[in-house]
Amino acid sequence: MILKKIFASLITFILIILFFSRVPVVISERLVEALWPIGHIVSFAFWAWLLLSFNAYIKSRGSKQQLFLLLLLTLIIGGGIELLQPFFSRSAQLGDLYSDLFGAFFAYLFFGNFNKNNNNFLIASRFLYIILLLYLMFPAMQTVKDEFETRIDFPIIAKFDSSSELTRWKADLPLSIVNSSELPVTRKSDTNLMKITFAAEKDSRAVLRFFAGNWQGYKQIKFSFFNPNQELLKVRLIITDQNYDKSTSENHTSNQNDRFGKWLLIDPGWNEYFVDLTDIENAPTERDMDLSNIAGVDFYMYKLKEPIILYVDNIELISPLD
């Protein structure tokens, strides 16, 4: 019993630390965001189980009283955590409190005091709960799968074999995947492309934020596009590293001399562009770009009078250094 209490206290301490500290940069921000609700569910399911198993008062109560006490304590503790998180560089989110309640309800369904006469109802409730839990976990599992694929696909930086790959990108208007056979001018290889719609605004973007960022050991990066328009498109390519991202987030400024920028003139039809990584490395005026920590690949269009569509094919590193 003493060992169980020590183990439970240790797990509780670790979970509390995670609620109020930054997760070490060993996994991507996107993966942390996807797994965060699951972390809340697991934490409060664990703590609710502790109360149901080891707290004499709650353990002896009937199922309805147990449910009331668990939900009340969850609201108090979960709400307290959300109120305190802004003081630890985190933001309070109502959705986290829903996850806390969902986790506590798990412990109640599987470890609460239930009348044996309600066995069929309990089995059905547990089954529905598991289905809902799997549904809630599905986006996170897709993200985990896609994070794994970014490493398997390297040195391909971006390709579009599945819709989950669109979660690597951020854009002003929705992104989608289309097959090259749907385009007015096809090519020999059957491939998927990402459809970007640039908005009719002062500036509009589609930016790649989650990818394998260690580009050391390669000579060039290759971009492939399909321009369905009748006129040439002028697209600004911007590439940044982790150092640039930190400076902009702290100062709320955009230092054009601390990043790589290049205008891409994209003709109607299929286009390929090659950029030397030495040019990217030497782009900042006061330092070298850190090719081992590339953080962003951005496409911008400016002052559009109407929405413009552009298709992006694979983005990949080529010509490994000997």
Image (spheres, rainbow, N blue to C red):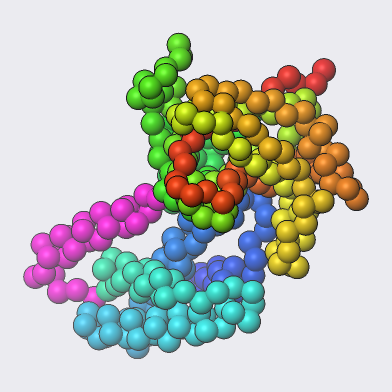
Percent x, y for residue 11?
Answer: 55, 68
Q: Is residue 63 above or below residue 117?
A: below
**In the figure, is residue 217 to the left or right of 304?**
right
Percent x, y for residue 64?
Answer: 21, 82
Q: Which residue corresponds to the image point at 44% horizontal and 63% vertical from the top-left? A: 37
Could you say which is closer to the camera, residue 145 or residue 223? 223
Q: Which residue corresponds to the image point at 73% horizontal and 34% vertical from the top-left? A: 215
Q: Is residue 16 visible?
A: no
Percent x, y for residue 309?
Answer: 45, 38
* 193 is within the stretch colored magenta: no
Check the image and name the residue furthest to the right: 286
Residues in magenta? Answer: 113-139
**In the figure, is residue 204 to the left or right of 128?**
right
* 128 is within the stretch colored magenta: yes
Could you say which is closer to the camera, residue 44 or residue 216? 216
Percent x, y for residue 308?
Answer: 47, 41
Residue 13, by quadrant, is bottom right
Q: Is residue 318 visible?
A: yes
Q: Quadrant of the C terminus?
A: top right
**Majority SS type along the magenta span:** helix
Q: Which residue corresponds to the image point at 54% horizontal and 38% vertical from the top-left? A: 148
Q: Which residue corresponds to the image point at 66% horizontal and 51% vertical from the top-left? A: 26
Number of marks in the rendered image: 0
